[in-house]
């Protein structure tokens, strides 16, 4: 889902009345390369649906003007197959059943983790055929297999630690994007990792050695900021 | 008594019943036995007297004693023997005693005739002193006899007594009859007792059956099964009434329990929404949005709002729980006009430049907690301000009612529909308007908190509202 490169971005409609949740959904999803349209209620959501086409809808069950189940049914009545991901606080099975019956494709209970939300979105998009996620990421001579978690360069296998693999995957998914050390630390080692950011420099240096990455680097150091991945360097 | 306490109610009632039954049946049996015995005795003695009377009169006439002035001089053994012999029969023997108490004639001649008992001096003296009906029981050779003493008078009712006839008769045949009667009585008593105790226990069991099912239900309920109800067969007796009020109590308990659960679920729901916002915002920041100052600012403002919302929620929950324990209500006399003069400043801050008028009512002194009263007013005032247009005024006034004062807060906002009004005091209930209008989201605890606070001070709260025209909240406080 190398969406950064493509102009035809995946479009997501968010129907959610809580401003804070809407805010982080918009910001987070934009960072992930999606095009996001927020709307605060069922009615506004319908209007947005009429004006544009969307690849996925994130729908809150508790809306000020109506409830999510009705919105869901209405969307199913008009437009057939757009994937709908429902958000709700209720954990009761009856509610899940009701949600799925009304036409939702998946279900997330608050408070959810953003990573899980992203995974669900990807799964829904894949299932509905809206993205064809390659099982392999390529950058010149380097091939990263997401299923076997193997990395090869010119067909030769390179052994990477999980952290190094995670770093390379992140770079290859977002070519040219500049990551700060802090962000890399959070994304690869987890949000609750307490150590300093120097550890990232160590991992990057190991990764460069293993990839035989000589200047001009594939993984470039951006002075005073962090690192960025430049796949065109892989040919040299 | 301690042993009794250990028994079940059924056993105790049964035992009491059995003891009472045995006691009464035995008393009745003994009384009837004694009564029959008395009847037999008196019957026998009157029979004997009736038989003796003509014989004695005949004898008196034959011996010319009726007109004699000194009849005792004429009483010799020969004459006495004739009389004694006449009075003696197969089961009765008569002896004649002179005034000194000496036996002058004994009627017993044949061996089958019973022996006469030795005269008893006490009874003899009573007979000699003129008592006609001296009757007593005695024994001869271990056999029971009935003894009758008849004073001898020359004429009926004459004070001259010249001798005493002692007639004695065996009671063995009466004894036999009585024995038969007694055994019949005892077996009857036994049958009555057995039947009575069996039916008694059965009856007690039947009437305690509802109690037993009550007990079973109680056990079920103590295990947490609140849907349990006692089936009541008889609605009129005490146990039936107990079962009915028990069922009512359980119904209330079940409702309270359900509302408690609903409340907890609502609290969880209200906690989850801000937590979702916080967690999501933090994750997005950590994933890299922290490097973008504008995203950072937007997300942190949102997080700040959510944290404030959580704090507000916690404060209100704490307030509710404190009010429910009633420990924090400190009532004191408050002069309303003075209170509102002080309150005006707080209210103006809340109103933020909007038109707010506090109309002074009559001079009253109420009994209330000033802190709670202030909270109630701020609470209701912020509701009124939130749900009415900026240019419309909010008015606070009060009026005197019998023994209480009624405070009103009116706005000219959009009002509430019937549906919203009926749920207005429910914790976490928010009308459609509340969810649409407020940019800073309320929690839905304000009115239920206000209600608790008013009620904790002994007042009542109600709302009158007309959609499109406005809302007035009324609450009362007791006068000092």
Image: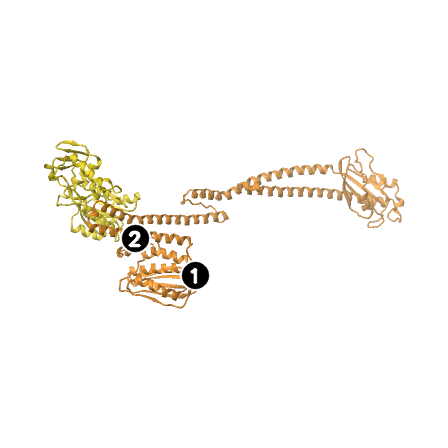
Q: Quadrant of residue A188?
A: top left
Q: Residue furthest left?
A: A236
Residue B136 in the figure: left or right of residue B303? right
- Of the two numbered discs 1 and 2 on the same chain, state the one appearing first in sequence: 2
Quadrant of image for the C terminus of chain A: top left
Q: Position of residue B476 (x, y in %)?
A: 39, 61
Q: Position of residue B58 (x, y in %)?
A: 83, 44
User: The disc numbered 2 marks a residue on which chain?
Assistant: B
Q: Label 2, on which residue?
A: B308
Q: Colour of chain A?
A: yellow
Above or below, comparing residue B282 to residue B392 in the picture: above
Above or below, comparing residue A212 to residue A226 in the picture: above
Query: Which sits in the foreground, B413 or B339?
Result: B339
Q: Position of residue B366 (x, y in %)?
A: 42, 63
Q: Label 1, on which residue?
A: B332
Q: Position of residue B198 (x, y in %)?
A: 55, 39
User: The disc numbered 1 marks a residue on which chain?
Assistant: B
Residue B261 in the figure: left or right of residue A49? right
- Residue at (68%, 37%) from the top-left corner? B179
Q: Colour of chain B?
A: orange
To the question of a shared chain for discs 1 and 2, the answer is: yes
Q: Could you say whether the residue bearing mark 1 is in a helix, strand or loop? A: strand
Query: Which sits in the foreground, B265 or B172?
Result: B265
Visual colour scheme: by chain
Q: Crowding at label 2, few (<14), some or many (≥20) Cα neighbours within 10 Å?
A: few
Residue A224 in the figure: left or right of residue B20? left
Distance between the Cα atoms at labels 1 and 2?
33 Å
Tag 1–tag 2 contact (CB < 8 Å): no
Q: Could you say whether the residue bearing mark 2 is in a helix, strand or loop? A: helix
């Amino acid at each position: 889902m190398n969406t950064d490169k493509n102009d035809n971005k995946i479009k997501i409609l968010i129907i959610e009345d809580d401003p804070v949740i809407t805010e982080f959904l918009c910001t987070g999803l934009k960072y992930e390369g999606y095009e996001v349209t927020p709307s605060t209620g069922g009615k506004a959501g319908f209007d947005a649906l009429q004006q544009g086409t969307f690849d996925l809808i994130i729908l809150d069950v508790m809306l000020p003007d109506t409830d999510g189940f009705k919105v869901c049914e209405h969307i199913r009545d008009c437009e057939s197959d757009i994937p709908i991901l429902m958000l709700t606080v209720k954990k009761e099975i009856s509610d899940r059943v009701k949600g799925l019956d009304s036409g939702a494709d998946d279900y997330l209970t608050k408070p959810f983790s953003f990573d899980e939300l992203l995974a669900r979105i990807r799964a829904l998009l894949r299932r509905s055929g809206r993205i064809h996620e390659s099982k392999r990421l390529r950058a010149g001579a380097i091939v990263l297999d997401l299923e076997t978690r193997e990395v090869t360069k010119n067909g030769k296998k390179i052994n990477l630690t999980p952290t190094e693999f995670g770093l390379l995957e992140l770079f290859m998914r977002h070519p040219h994007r500049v990551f700060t050390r802090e962000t890399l630390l959070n994304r690869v080692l987890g949000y609750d990792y307490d150590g300093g950011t120097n550890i990232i420099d160590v991992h990057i240096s190991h990764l460069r050695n293993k990839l035989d990455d000589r200047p001009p680097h594939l993984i470039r150091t951006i002075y005073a900021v962090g690192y960025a991945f430049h796949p065109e360097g892989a040919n040299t | 008594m301690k042993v009794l306490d250990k028994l079940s109610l059924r056993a105790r009632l049964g035992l009491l019943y059995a003891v009472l039954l045995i006691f009464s049946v035995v008393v009745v049996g003994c009384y009837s036995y004694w009564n029959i015995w008395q009847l037999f005795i008196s019957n026998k003695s009157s029979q004997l007297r009736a038989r003796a009377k003509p014989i004695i009169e005949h004898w008196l006439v034959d011996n010319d004693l009726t007109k004699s002035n000194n009849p005792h001089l004429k009483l010799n053994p020969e004459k006495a023997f004739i009389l004694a012999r006449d009075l003696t029969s197969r089961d009765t023997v008569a002896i004649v005693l002179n005034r000194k108490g000496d036996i002058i004639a004994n009627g017993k001649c044949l061996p089958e005739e019973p022996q006469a008992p030795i005269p008893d001096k006490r009874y003899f003296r009573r007979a000699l002193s003129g008592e006609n009906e001296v009757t007593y029981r005695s024994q001869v050779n271990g056999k029971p006899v009935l003894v009758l003493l008849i004073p001898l008078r020359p004429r009926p009712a004459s004070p001259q007594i010249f001798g005493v006839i002692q007639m004695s008769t065996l009671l063995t045949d009466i004894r036999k009859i009585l024995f038969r009667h007694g055994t019949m009585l005892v077996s009857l008593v036994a049958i009555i007792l057995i039947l009575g105790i069996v039916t008694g226990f059965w009856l007690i069991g039947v009437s305690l059956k509802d109690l037993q099912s009550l007990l079973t239900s109680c056990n079920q309920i103590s295990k947490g099964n609140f849907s349990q109800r006692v089936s009541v067969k008889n609605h009129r007796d005490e146990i039936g009434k107990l079962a009915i009020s028990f069922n009512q109590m359980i119904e209330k308990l079940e409702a309270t329990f359900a509302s408690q659960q609903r409340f907890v679920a609502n609290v969880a729901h209200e906690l989850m929404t801000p937590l979702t916002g916080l967690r999501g915002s933090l994750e997005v920041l950590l994933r890299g949005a922290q490097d973008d100052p504008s995203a950072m600012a937007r997300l942190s403002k949102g997080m700040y709002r959510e944290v404030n919302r959580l704090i507000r929620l916690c404060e209100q929950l704490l307030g509710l729980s404190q009010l429910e324990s009633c420990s924090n209500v400190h009532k004191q006399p408050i002069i309303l006009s003075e209170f509102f003069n002080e309150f005006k400043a707080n209210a103006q801050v809340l109103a933020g430049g909007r038109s707010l008028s506090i109309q002074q009512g009559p001079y009253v002194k109420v009994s209330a907690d000033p802190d709670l009263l202030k909270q109630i007013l701020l609470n209701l005032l912020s509701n009124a301000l939130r749900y009415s247009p900026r240019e419309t005024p909010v008015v606070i006034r009060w009026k005197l009612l019998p023994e209480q004062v009624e405070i009103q807060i009116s706005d000219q906002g959009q009002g509430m529909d019937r549906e919203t009004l009926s749920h207005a005091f429910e914790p976490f209930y928010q009308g459609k308007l509340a969810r649409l209008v407020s940019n800073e989201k309320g929690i839905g605890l304000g009115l239920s908190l206000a209600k608790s606070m008013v009620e904790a001070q002994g007042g009542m709260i109600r709302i009158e509202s007309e959609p499109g025209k406005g809302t007035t909240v009324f609450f009362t406080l007791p006068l000092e």
